Amino acid sequence: MMRYLRLLPVAAATMVAAFGVQSAQAQSSITVSGTQYKLCGQENDNCKFSGSGSVVFGVVPPNAPSSMLTSPRSFSNGVGCYVGAVSQSDPAYGYGKSCWVSLASTTTPPATSTPATTPAPSTPAPSTPAPSTPAITTPVTATPAPTAPATTAPATTTPSTSTPTPTTSAITCGSPTQTAGGSGSGLISADTPTTDGLRIFQNNAPFKLAITTNSPAADTVVWSVADANGSIKTQGSFPVKSGAQTNSISCTSTWSGYAALTATLQSHGGTLPSSGTRPMGIATFGVLPNLSSVLGTVTYAHQDQHRFGMQGFNGNIAALRALGISWTIDDRQVSAMEPNGPDTYTPSVNDLDPFYKANPDQMRIVRLDGLPAWDSKTGQFNDSYYAPSNMPEFQRFMAKVGTDTSLIRAANYPNQQKNYYQVTWEPSLGWADSDANFVAMYKAAYEGIHSTDPNAVVMGTGNPFASNCDTCTTGYLKKFGALGLWNYIDAVSTHGYWNAGTYPSHPPELQDSDPNPANQANALDNQMTQLRAVMQAGKPNMKLFFTEAGVSYDPGLNYGPTVPSANQLFAHAAVGARAHIITLGGGAQVTTLFFGPDYPGEVGYGSFFDLNNAQGSFGATNLSPKPEAMAFAAMTRALDGTNTLGRVNGTPSGTFAYSFQQLGNGKVVTAAWTHSNAQWPASNGQYSQTYTSAYTLQVDNAGTSGNVTKIDGYGNVSTVPYTNGKATLTLTEVPQYIVSNNATVAKANSTVPVGYTGQ
């Protein structure tokens, strides 16, 4: 894939000023492809209008030699008129640009006179501001909502009766408190500091934007906060003096999601510096959703009914809880517990990482792969590639692990029903021993653990891919199952990669529309069907744990000051969430998110930027979220505490919908999205942030009408009406979650995965 260079909001306008380019009054109206557009805003301001409208951004004669405009793009209730909001690219670098809107309704656009450089304030200043503290502004328009696609994407009409009604959600900020001095670098820098290093905030709780300036002369800071789709959530400006100055802005947010803060000096320019793996131009933070009023409280009969695990944040309880995680992986390999020789491990109830003792909401998947040199046929450490050289000792060791785990569960996890063990870890990457020894190793592990742990669930085989190849988990289950493996596992574990490289340009649905059935089989939803079928044939109704699945950046991208682009981050989040929903909807009890922070070598798997290390690090703690982290936070809150009802029947090609029901016969949550390979990426190399399709979901009995609740991909809530039992949804590439009450209808319209019997 081509590399996408980040184009910085706001900063582009200041570069124009630096080059001495003057912006003449823009044309009050223009015609594009036969459609008239009216001026709605100048660059670095808001394009203001009410209702839905199609917006073009750029410059036309006489202010430029020729028209240089973006393709029309649809927004609701206004949009920021600058790169990163109205457009992901600059159509006329070096020129002062404008925005023009063609309204989809009869709503009258604002006057076409040049807007003031700063919109009127809509947020009152704190009751006791410093006398010299200047006011900042926040937008008066409602939160922009995605609407019909630009003309470059297939358009779909959604009946007005099903337009979601949003609840009021916004970021509101007060006036900056300004003090001399500061520790920032360059002309301008920014942060949203937290004591836990996450830069994630609770909904409707106070937080601070800290903008540090070092201007050579008095100037004005222009700042904004945009969501993952580039829509401006709040913005403002304030004067600063020359020299180092720290400007602290107090905010609260009833809106939830990923937020990218940008800032620049109006006259002297400057942009936010890169930090670690986070590119220049942004300082990111997140606001968690509060869905208690929509979803209520789920009662768990057993703790192990939770559905989400994670790799990369062992020890970071703040991150795990922010992301809604209940499972992590704990090492009990021979190589970890007996590195120096046989029979040296003594099980103990105190043999538990203090992290787990302090945080019993985090359950353990016990990892058993890994042999030290003394027990390895190669004379060196090996991981799942040979059976142990001392098989009787291996079985004795596993019995000790069973004792250890039983004691720990009784003391720390009284409401956890079972203990879960994974024997091998991606063995297909290097298994070099005999087939018979593979089964013998599982037999020794199974019999050793079950001899001391009556509540054990022994799992395998943990291959990288779920299905449709000899080296996939299904291939190993069939091959070694014929040799007796089914007798030595209680459940199946696998990793959830659907391709040798999972990244935005190879999404899990890529091959669903392939005309060749052999290629269709590689799509993740079809792999789930195959896996469940093989499991059911081998040993009916087993549990299924996905113990790793993640998404990197596109091939060819490397950590750097301009990587990733905002569009890459948007796509990274959408694909990451969709993959885990397919996994759960296809019949997994548990799915495991991969990875916490960015780390070296494999670029972009992290759901957080590492702010200290330019190539990332496995144990990073100074972090800021990517869109994926906040999409995960919404997904876990929507889907944890549910049973899978399954794929919704009869969905058209390109529509994906899976229904779930809260434990205890609670509410129905249907996750739904659309996907078009032609838009992912489109011919311009960008992943479409505006592509939509209409889908009618049966939510109640025929003849009934009412409302259901929509939770967007980042946890914001709106109401969708339905008539005759059906709600018409506008689906995007980002999943949404529809909350309804008629479980009978949902069950009748969904197909439970084969062998899935609940949590």
Image: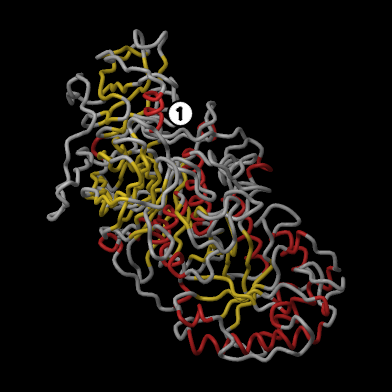
Q: What percent of the width, then of the height, locates residue 348?
A: 60, 91
Number of residues whose C-alpha sits closer than 10 Å to that of mark 1, classed few (under 14), some (14–19) or many (20 or more): many
| Location of mark 1 (residue) | 89
Horizontally, residue 737 falls left or right of residue 340, namely left
Q: Quadrant of residue 733?
A: top left
Identify the residue at image location x=31%, y=33%.
80
What amino acid is labelled 1 in the image? Ser
Identify the residue at image location x=68%, y=68%.
538
Is residue 596 shown above or below 656? below
Q: What percent of the width, then of the height, locates residue 390?
A: 83, 82
- Let me know if residue 710 appears in the view: no
Q: What percent of the width, then of the height, locates residue 628?
A: 47, 51
Is residue 328 shown above or below 406? above
Q: What percent of the width, then of the height, locates residue 339?
A: 75, 80
Is residue 256 shown above or below 430? above
Q: Quadrant of residue 22?
A: top left
Q: Quadrant of residue 269?
A: top left
Horizontally, residue 106 falls left or right of residue 101, namely left
Q: Secondary structure at mark 1?
A: loop
As rendered, which of 176 and 573 lies closer to the eye? 176
Is residue 180 shown above or below 157? below
For the N terminus, the image quarter is top right
Horizontally, residue 571 falls left or right of residue 386, namely left
